[in-house]
Image (tube, helix red, strand yellow):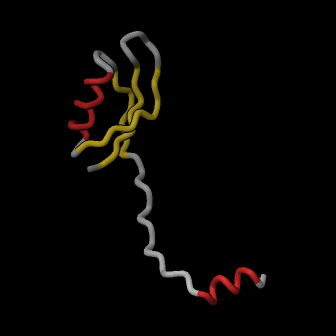
């Protein structure tokens, strides 16, 4: 699933920015958005950047701890 970031104008005229919605595609995300903000006007939609994958960590050794203490 992708994350989409919307900028929209509510039916009362207020501008809302950075509404993030997960969806299989843009149409799915827009459908979910319209369930929350009925009768809104979508001003912009971009695919939001995803967080980078975390690197696997290695176990901390005794030598690592000693090196931190001795600094």
Taking the image as shown, residue 54 lies to the left or right of residue 4, namely right
Q: Residue at x 21, y 36 (%)?
A: 27
Q: Give residue 62's quadrant in the image.
A: bottom right
Q: Residue at x 31, y 23 (%)?
A: 36
Q: How many marks?
A: 0
Most extreme residue toward the front, as rendered?
A: 62
Q: Give residue 46's quadrant in the image.
A: top left
| Residue 18 percent location from the top left of the image | 45, 35
Position above or below: 23 against 15: below
Position above or below: 57 against 36: below
Most extreme residue toward the right, as rendered?
A: 71
Q: Residue at x 45, y 25 (%)?
A: 16
| Residue 48 percent location from the top left of the image | 40, 46
Taking the image as shown, residue 1 lies to the left or right of residue 10, namely left
Q: Nearer the viewer, residue 41 or 36?
A: 36
Q: Nearer the viewer, residue 22 or 39?
A: 22
| Residue 8 percent location from the top left of the image | 39, 25
Position above or below: 44 against 22: above
Most extreme residue toward the top, as rendered?
A: 12
Q: Residue at x 36, y 36 (%)?
A: 45
Q: What is the quadrant of the C terminus in the image? A: bottom right
Q: Give residue 4's quadrant in the image.
A: top left
| Residue 39 percent location from the top left of the image | 29, 15
């Amino acid at each position: 699933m992708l994350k989409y970031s919307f900028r929209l104008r509510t039916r009362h005229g207020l501008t809302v920015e950075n509404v993030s919605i997960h969806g299989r595609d843009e149409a799915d995300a827009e459908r979910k958005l319209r369930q929350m903000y009925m009768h809104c006007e979508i001003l912009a939609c971009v695919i939001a950047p995803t967080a980078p994958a975390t690197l696997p960590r290695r176990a901390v050794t005794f030598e690592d701890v000693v090196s931190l203490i001795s600094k």
